[in-house]
Each structure stands twice: as structure tokens, then as C-alpha cells.
Image (tube, grey):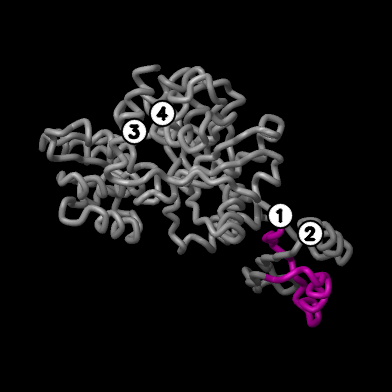
């Protein structure tokens, strides 16, 4: 432990030649809401808007004689590696899936400049990763894993070093998002028993929870890629070796829709842009009230590389989770005045967000897809009661994943 802490301090000091420490900011809104001193460790304010620059820097720093670095990534890791290639004068070859949004490709290119080349290969990340590793083996470069690498883990531990220095002491709790486990294992290992570390994962990528249950890293059957910065199908071997004794209650799993509520609130109220993975730690505060009241808590906001083209989807998911937006399949009688009767069911706080006939061929009834937004979730009880009283048949499909994929 003493060697790891010392090495992480050395890495942190070396980073200061390239980029400053990210801010540790007390958040008044969250502190008052949860009755605790809540600080945000703003990794979203690093030069590449995520903590990935730390691991990339440290791993490359420890390979001074290596001129070629290879990685596979569709996002933050690619940008961290590209930035450091330009800073250190190294050559980088970055493999990205063909499906990677142009915004991410352009940012990676901007950070790396002439020091990097980008290969678009494979529709899925596993195919991209295999192509990158094969290319690296044939060319003799150093493959830089985003998380399953001792030097990367040590570099990410610099977050803990900075927290302690900025706060002047160890916090009571640190809440860490988990993807492949590089950052969470590094920070938790550096703090050791001095700090209670809590780990949070998206429901569709709960690879730490699965590994703890199995006693080893296991591949998830399915991964929901919405929380792309933490949507990892299998935690790294090296990170898991450091996290394998984590108590099960210390691992929190949050739904993707729920995470969206924090993204929207942080943006609208605080002016903080967080990507889905970056919002994980903040949203988890609501699940640990009994532990954190009156304590000092640090939430690591791991990244802010948010594509604003996703904002309508994020808002939609947040509204659905909060219960203020629902989608119904409504059987509407095919007669004059029927639509007006339905509209009279709605109250002053209700609004129609979508109205689409799905089937009008029946003589007596037509099926309508209708989206309703309202101010308070309890308003839907009134709407449903009025629909029942009027004899209008309806089905709430808001949480029906299969229908939602095709219709919403």
C-alpha cells in the first residue's frame, strides 16, 4: 500500500507539468438537500473533459522508450491517449468502431493532431478491440488498455491524491462510478481503510456486481450502452483483484432513466454538463442517506463529454422516470366528438406531446398512440380514472421496452 500511495503521488506531481489539478467544489444544492458536505471532484473539467487523461499520461510516462501506442476506444480513452501523444511527441494509433459519432472522432483528431491516426473498424467494440490488439501485435507497439493496466490504475489514483490535498484531510465517503474498474480501484486502493468508498454502476452494465457475485470477472449477457462511459461488459482482471473484497451493499446499481434526471438537473440548475457516466455518483446520493448525513462526501463526476444531440432522449427518459410523461395506446371511438371528449379529460397541467393514429381501418374504433406530459405524477391517476369512467380503453406502454423501441 505504501508503495502504491508513493507512486501515485509521484504520478500526480508529474502530471502538473501537463495539466492542473481538477477542481474540488462544495455543492450547496446537494449539501442542503442531503444534510451533508457534498463535494464534486470535477473530472469533467480536465483538458479532455474526463479522468482518462490521467491513466494515459502515467502509462505513457512509464514507457519513455516506446514511440508507438495503440488503443481501442469510442470515447474518453481515445481522447486521453490522443492528447498525451501530442503532448509527449509519441505516435498513436487509435481504433474506433465504425458507428462512433463524428463529434467524438473529430475531438480525438483535434487532441492528437498529426501525432495520431484513427482506424474505424467494426460495428461493435469487441470487434474493434480485437482489430486493435492484432494490429499492435503485428506492428510492435504498446497496447494501452483503458482500465486493465497497473500503470493506468496508478494514474487514475491521482484523483485520490488531489482530493486529499484539496480537502486538507480524507473525506468520510467517496462515491465512484464503475466501468472497467480502473479509476474506482485506483482511488479505493489509495484511500484504503481511511475512507468508505461506494461504487455505482448503470443497471445495464453492472459488471462489478456480477463479478462480486461470481467471485471473478464474468461477461454480462447483455450491455445497455446508454451510459457509454461505464457500459462495460466485463470488469478488468487487475481492477477486480483490488476490489474483490468490496461488501455487496457498497455497490449501487442505478437505472439508465434515473441517471437522466441528474444530467438534466445539473445542466438546468447548476450549469454543469455531465455525460451519463459522469452523473452516476451524484445520482447515487439518494441511496445512501443514512450513511452520509452530517458527513463529508466526495462525488467523482468522471466526465462531461456529452453530445447535445442526445439531449432530447435524456429529457425524455428523465420525464418518464419521474412519472410526468407517459405513453398510452388509446382505443378511440370512430364517431364525431370522440376526440373532443378525450381532450376534456385532460386538466390544465396536462399537455399532449404526441398524437398518432396507428390504425384507422376498423369501422368502430381506431388505435391512437398518445404521449402526455403533466406537471405532477399524481395527475395521471386522475386522467386514468376519467378514461375508465368514460369507457375509453387504454394501455400504458411507458415501461414496455419492446413496444417503446418500435413506437416511441
- 61 sits left or right of 282 in the view: left
Front one among 58 and 202: 58
For label 2, the SS is helix
Front one among 81 and 18: 18
Q: Which mark is residue 323?
A: 1
Rendering coords of residue 114 (x, y %): 15, 55
User: Is residue 233 shown to the viewer in this render?
Assistant: no
- Please report whichever mark, 4 or 1, sits nearer to the chain's N-terminal start: 4
User: How packed is label 3: few (under 14 Cα within 10 Å), some, or many (20 or more)?
Assistant: many
- Please report whichever mark, 3 or 4, sits nearer to the chain's N-terminal start: 3
Report if the CB atoms under discs 1 and 3 are less than 8 Å apart: no
For label 1, the SS is loop
Compared to residue 258, the image places residue 55 above or below, namely above
Q: Which mark is residue 155?
A: 3
Q: Is residue 114 magenta?
A: no
Image quadrant where one finds the N terminus = top left
Gap in angstroms between the C-alphas marked 3 and 4 = 8 Å
Rendering coords of residue 84 (x, y %): 24, 45
Q: State the residue at coordinates (28%, 36%).
A: 14
Gap in angstroms between the C-alphas marked 3 and 2 = 50 Å
Report if the CB atoms under discs 3 and 2 are less than 8 Å apart: no
- 384 sits left or right of 4 in the view: right
- Please report whichever mark, 1 or 3, sits nearer to the chain's N-terminal start: 3
Q: Is residue 344 magenta?
A: yes
Q: How many marks?
A: 4
For label 4, the SS is helix
Q: Which residue is mark 2?
A: 380
Q: State the residue at coordinates (35%, 51%).
A: 47
Report if the CB atoms under discs 1 and 2 are less than 8 Å apart: yes
Q: Which residues are magenta?
A: 323-352
Q: State the residue at coordinates (33%, 54%).
A: 99
Q: Which residue is mark 4?
A: 186
Amino acid at each position: 500500500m505504501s508503495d502504491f500511495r508513493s507512486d501515485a503521488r509521484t504520478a500526480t506531481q508529474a502530471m502538473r507539468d501537463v495539466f492542473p489539478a481538477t477542481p474540488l467544489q462544495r455543492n450547496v444544492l446537494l449539501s442542503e438537500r442531503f444534510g451533508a458536505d457534498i463535494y464534486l471532484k470535477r473530472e469533467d473539467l480536465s483538458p479532455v473533459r474526463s479522468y482518462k487523461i490521467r491513466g494515459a499520461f502515467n502509462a505513457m510516462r512509464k514507457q519513455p522508450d516506446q514511440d508507438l501506442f495503440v488503443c481501442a476506444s469510442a470515447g474518453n480513452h481515445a481522447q486521453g491517449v490522443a492528447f498525451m501523444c501530442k503532448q509527449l511527441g509519441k505516435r498513436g494509433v487509435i481504433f474506433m468502431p465504425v458507428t462512433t459519432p463524428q463529434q467524438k472522432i473529430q475531438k480525438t483528431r483535434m487532441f492528437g493532431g498529426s501525432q495520431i491516426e484513427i482506424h474505424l473498424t467494426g460495428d461493435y467494440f469487441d470487434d474493434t478491440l480485437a482489430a486493435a490488439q492484432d494490429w499492435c501485435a503485428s506492428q510492435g507497439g504498446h497496447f494501452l488498455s483503458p482500465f486493465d493496466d497497473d500503470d493506468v490504475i496508478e494514474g487514475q489514483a491521482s484523483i485520490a491524491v488531489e482530493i486529499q490535498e484539496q480537502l486538507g484531510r480524507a473525506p468520510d465517503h467517496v462515491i465512484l462510478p464503475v466501468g472497467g474498474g480502473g479509476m474506482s480501484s485506483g482511488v479505493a486502493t489509495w484511500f484504503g481503510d481511511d475512507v468508505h468508498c461506494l461504487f455505482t454502476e448503470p443497471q445495464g452494465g453492472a459488471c462489478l456486481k456480477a463479478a462480486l457475485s461470481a467471485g471473478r470477472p464474468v461477461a454480462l449477457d447483455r450491455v445497455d450502452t446508454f451510459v457509454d462511459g461505464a457500459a462495460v461488459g466485463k470488469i478488468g482482471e487487475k481492477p477486480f483483484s483490488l476490489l474483490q473484497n468490496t461488501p455487496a451493499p457498497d455497490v449501487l446499481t442505478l437505472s439508465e432513466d434515473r441517471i437522466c434526471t441528474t444530467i438534466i438537473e445539473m445542466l438546468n440548475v447548476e450549469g454543469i454538463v455531465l455525460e451519463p457516466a459522469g452523473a452516476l455518483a451524484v445520482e447515487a446520493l439518494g441511496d445512501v442517506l443514512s450513511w452520509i448525513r452530517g458527513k463529508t462526501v466526495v462525488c467523482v463526476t468522471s466526465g462531461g463529454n456529452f453530445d447535445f444531440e442526445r439531449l432530447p432522449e435524456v429529457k425524455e427518459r428523465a420525464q418518464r422516470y419521474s412519472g410526468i410523461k407517459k405513453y398510452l395506446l388509446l382505443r378511440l371511438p370512430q364517431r364525431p366528438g370522440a376526440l373532443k371528449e378525450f381532450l376534456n379529460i385532460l386538466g390544465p397541467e396536462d399537455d399532449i406531446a404526441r398524437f398518432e393514429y396507428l390504425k384507422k381501418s376498423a369501422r368502430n374504433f381506431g388505435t391512437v398512440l398518445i404521449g402526455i406530459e403533466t406537471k405532477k405524477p399524481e395527475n395521471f391517476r386522475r386522467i386514468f380514472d376519467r378514461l375508465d369512467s368514460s369507457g375509453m380503453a387504454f394501455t400504458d406502454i411507458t415501461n414496455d421496452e419492446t413496444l417503446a423501441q418500435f413506437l416511441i
